[in-house]
Structure formats: C-alpha cells, structure tokens
Amino acid sequence: MQIYLDHSATTPTRPEAIEAMVQSLRQAWGNPSSLHHWGETAATDLEMARLQVADLIQAPAESIIFTSGGTEANNLALMGVTQRLEQPGHLIISSVEHAAIAQPARQLAQQGWQVTPLPVNGQGRVDPQALEAAIRPDTRLISVIYGQSEVGTLQPIETLAAMAGRHGVLFHTDAVQVAGRLPLDVAALGVDLLSLSSHKLYGPKGAGALYVRPGVSLAPLLAGGGQEAGRRSGTEAVANLVGFGVAAALAKEELDTEARRLAGLRDRLFEQLATVWNLQVSGDRQHRLPHHVSFLVDLDDAQGKPVTGKALVRQLNLAGIAISSGSACHSGQLAPSPILLAMGYPERLARAGIRLTLGRETTEADIDWTAMVLKQFLTRPFP
C-alpha cells in the first residue's frame, strides 16, 4: 500500500484546479495589467480567483493581496506593518510560530525591534493572560499562529485578537494550516491580517494570499509596477491563482462534511495507538486541527540510542507510508524541534516528534494499516 499522511506539508492539486489552470494558460495568458482584450481576459480570471479566496474567509475581495505563498504572506504582514513606521517598536509573537514568522521576527530584532515570544503550555497553547501582560505602550503588532503545523494545536485567536484590539494593536494570524479545514470568518475572528497558502488546500504551489483589513496600511516588500493595488508588485501568476481560487471555492463547499470526516479519522488513529506505551501524544487533543495527529517517540534503538522522529519517518517510508518529523538536520547533527522545546520537552523528546496529517483521499483502511505498521515498528527491537 502507498499511503500519504503528510498533508500539512503539501496536498495533491485537485483535478478541478488543474483543469482550470490549463484553461487559463490556454485562454487567459495575457498580462492582467494590460488594457486590451487579452489583458482583460486575464484580469477577469484573476478577479474571480480573488472573489473565491475572499469568500473562503468571508472577507471583501479588495482586502486580498495575492502572493507567491504563505511565506511571502507572513513576511508581508510583519515587514509591511513594521517598515512603514519611522522608529522600531515592540513586536509580540508566540514561541511556536512557523519559521516564516520566527525568522522575519529575528531580522526585525536585528533592526532594533523589541521582540517578545509568548510562552505556551505543554500542549502548545498561548495563555491570553500572558499576552495581556506582554502588551506595552509601544507594541505595534502581534502575530500568533492559528493552527500549529507540527503539533496541531489551535490557538484562541478570537480572544487574543480582541485583546489586541482593546489596546489598539494590530493582530496577524498565520492561518495556513486552518484554511480549508475549519471555517474562517475574519470579522468574527477580529484579525487585521491573515495569511493563506494555496498548496495546503489542494491548490497549486506558488500561490498564496494575505488578508488585510480595510484601513490597514502596509509598506510593500517589492518595488515595481504597482500590482495588487500597489501593495505587491510583480505580474500575477494568473493560472496559479486561478487554481488557488477553484481549490478555495471547493474547500468551502465541502468544509463541514470533510472537517467532520477528518476529525473522525484523526480520533480513530489516536485511539488505535493509545495503548502503544512508547508513543506520547503531542499538542492539544481538544483544541486541534481536524486532520492532525502527532506523537513523541520514547524509544531506544538496538545500540541504546534514542530513536528520532526522522528515523521513524525513514522506516515508514520503506513501508510505503509518508509521514513527517519536526526535527531538522544541521551540519550533520539532528537539531531538536524548537516548537517542542518551547512546549517544555527535553532535547531527547524534542528530536523524537512525528506528525501524521490526513487528507481528502485518506480512508479508514489507511488509518488501520498505518496503526498496525506503527505498532509493529514500536513493539519490536528498532534497527
């Protein structure tokens, strides 16, 4: 069997999105900024995609800035807000952000910004009172990830955004893992900025979006032709964005049914592995992405060394099952996951995280087979 359980890394592009992209490449290949027929045809496709993406998060179409993906959207949120200010101020992020937020925050710290990483509990969740205590008179922006990609924990974004609003501070959330899996309503959430990525919801890679609440101004990252209402220069990748739009529209149409189905499969996998003594659930079981299962592997190999998450990823790959690990290899050394370290785990376990993320094609048979294979690997001497 070939089983793909790495949908938080990327999803297969939907056939409907591919078909729409091919049609766009054939019939709407003009530059959408051009005023003639060919340009207008491309511009029409582009604006339809904008409407579809906006509808997914219940936002006005003009509030959507198209980008090359979630990373650019996150960078535009942080740098766009901070670079329009004359003096560095104070930035708050969570300690479990994706690198596309954590790295720009480090760059801002080098530019004189004071950056406060909010602590999280053992499940990876921010305490709203910690945010309240961290806000200062010079706080200019707060960015907290909505659904954590490594451990699946959902943050109380509505509560956190309301707190920021009471202090007059802009609030951004990285919703890349949430979009298409849970309902999103930017007005109800109360956020000022929200990041999206096409390839996490069965659209193509190379497309993303940043929602910017009307009235919020950003400094553009790219200087050039002034596309995207002057907020993101560069000729838009119309076909990719068309695919993004179609995927977003279908995701919204299927959202309720698919979220319930995925949550059922997720819980089935948790239940089947509950008796495996050397697997420890990571992340919050109650406040969790519907497609997300994650564990820490507490096991030694035949040489008495701790089994890492990456080692188990390789073993499952040989068995035809794709999962992932949060650890990274730097200079030949396996680095512990910064997310797991922030959650309070020791380095041994912070190297031992695995993630299994489910998708549209995942079946009960896939879940049952994966659980059986994992049990076999973990209840016999590890190579």
Image (spheres, grey):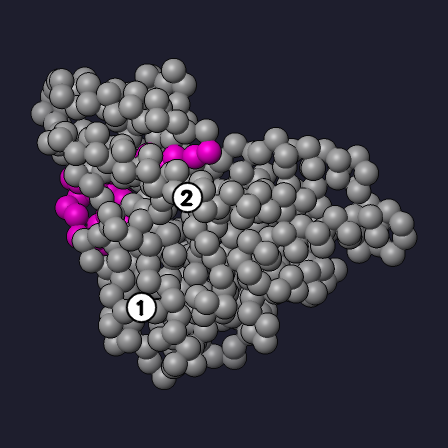
- N-terminal of the pair, mark 1 or mark 2, is 1
Instruction: Give how far across and how far down residue 159 sits, in percent.
Output: 34, 69
Q: Residue 111's quadrant in the figure?
A: bottom left
Taking the spot 31% from the left edge, 68% from the top edge, the residue there is 116
Taking the spot 46% from the left edge, 54% from the top edge, the residue there is 183
Label 2: how many residues lie within 10 Å, few (<14), some (14-19) or many (20+)?
many
Q: Residue 351's quadrant in the figure?
A: top left
Q: Is residue 192 left or right of residue 217?
A: left
Q: Residue 353's quadrant in the figure?
A: top left
Taking the spot 24% from the left edge, 62% from the top edge, the residue there is 119
Query: Which quarter of the figure is the C terminus placed in?
Result: top left
Which of the two discs, 1 and 2, sits closer to the camera? 2
Q: Are marks 1 and 2 in contact (CB under 8 Å)?
A: no
How many numbered callouts?
2
Q: Circle 1 is placed at which residue position?
A: 116
Q: Amino acid at mark 2?
A: Ala
Q: Is residue 96 left or right of residue 76?
A: left
Instruction: Give how far across and how far down residue 135 sits, in percent.
Output: 32, 77
Q: CA distance from mark 1 to mark 2?
A: 34 Å
**152 in magenta:** no
Taking the spot 46% from the left edge, 67% from the top edge, the residue there is 188
Instruction: Give how far across and how far down residue 222 sits, in percent.
Output: 63, 59
Q: Amino acid at mark 1?
A: Thr
Residue 335, placed above or below residue 378: below
Query: Which quarter of the figure is the N terminus placed in?
Result: top left
Residue 113, placed above or below residue 297: below
Label 1: how many residues lie within 10 Å, few (<14), some (14-19) or many (20+)?
some
Q: Secondary structure at mark 2?
A: helix
Q: Secondary structure at mark 1?
A: strand
> Residue 259 got which mark?
2
Q: Which residues are magenta?
A: 334-360
